[in-house]
Amino acid sequence: MSTNKETKKQVVAEVKEDLKNAKVAIVTDYRGLNVEQVTELRRALRAESIKYVVVKNTLASIATRELGLEVLDTYLAGPTAIAYGFGDQAAPAKILSKYAKSFEKLEIKGGLLQGTLIDPPQIKVLAELPPRDVLLAQVAGAFAAPMTGFAGVAQGILRKFVGTLDAVREKRVAEA
């Protein structure tokens, strides 16, 4: 077996592994970016533990076919790089969207979010989500609000009950 075939098989295996493990994979066209811009983008992505890899479309397509993710092939045309997010699902979208504004040549083509195809407008929505801790605080607040209301109502009922008992006690003391 030639080294070239082995290298291609290794690339396909790596793309498959990354697609399997990534929570989000965003496909970009980096055509027109200079080395300095690509380096800056990679550095920003790496800081958030996001893997950014230039791939050959044919090899990526073989990997998607083997995983049953052929829907991603829609975005595998022209120079392609894929950002794989293994942690925060919104982080790759946020960083790529930020750099797409700075570097007009960077094009976000589309991607996968937990195996579901997402298009550029959906990636933009994902990029605009508040950070995870803010979302969790909002959810906790939403759960706490009804409980706080219930506690207030229960406290009011308890207060009325105690007031009624106190009135009965005072009436009995007055009668005695």
Image (cartoon, grey):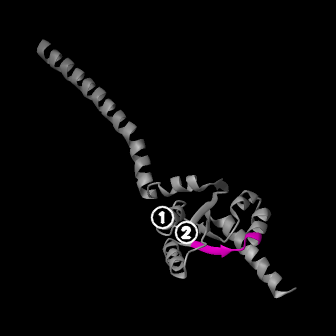
Quarter of the rendering occupied by the C terminus: top left
Q: Which mark is residue 170?
A: none
Q: How many discs appear? A: 2
Residue drawn at x 63%, y 74% is 53
Residue at the spot 75% in from the left edge and 73% down from the top edge: 12
Is label 1 in contact with label 2 (beta carbons under 8 Å)?
A: no
The residue at which mark 2 appears reads as: 105
Q: Residue furthest bottom?
A: 3
Residue 60 horizontal/vertical position (percent): 73, 69
- In front of the other: 157 or 81: 81
Judge from the rendering whether residue 163 lies leftward or rightward of residue 28; answer left or right. left
| Secondary structure type for disc 2 | loop
Picture coordinates of residue 155, whole percent (x, y): 29, 32
Q: Quadrant of the N terminus?
A: bottom right
Res 97 visible: yes
Does the magenta portion include 54? yes
Side of 72 relative to 39 (left or right): right
In the image, residue 25 lies at what x, y percent?
62, 64
- Say left or right for 93 vs 4: left
Type of residue at label 2? Answer: Lys
Rendered position, 167 above or below 108: above
Q: Secondary structure at mark 1?
A: helix
Q: Which mark is residue 101?
A: 1
Q: Which residues are magenta?
A: 51-58
Does residue 23 show up?
A: no
* Type of amino acid under label 1: Lys
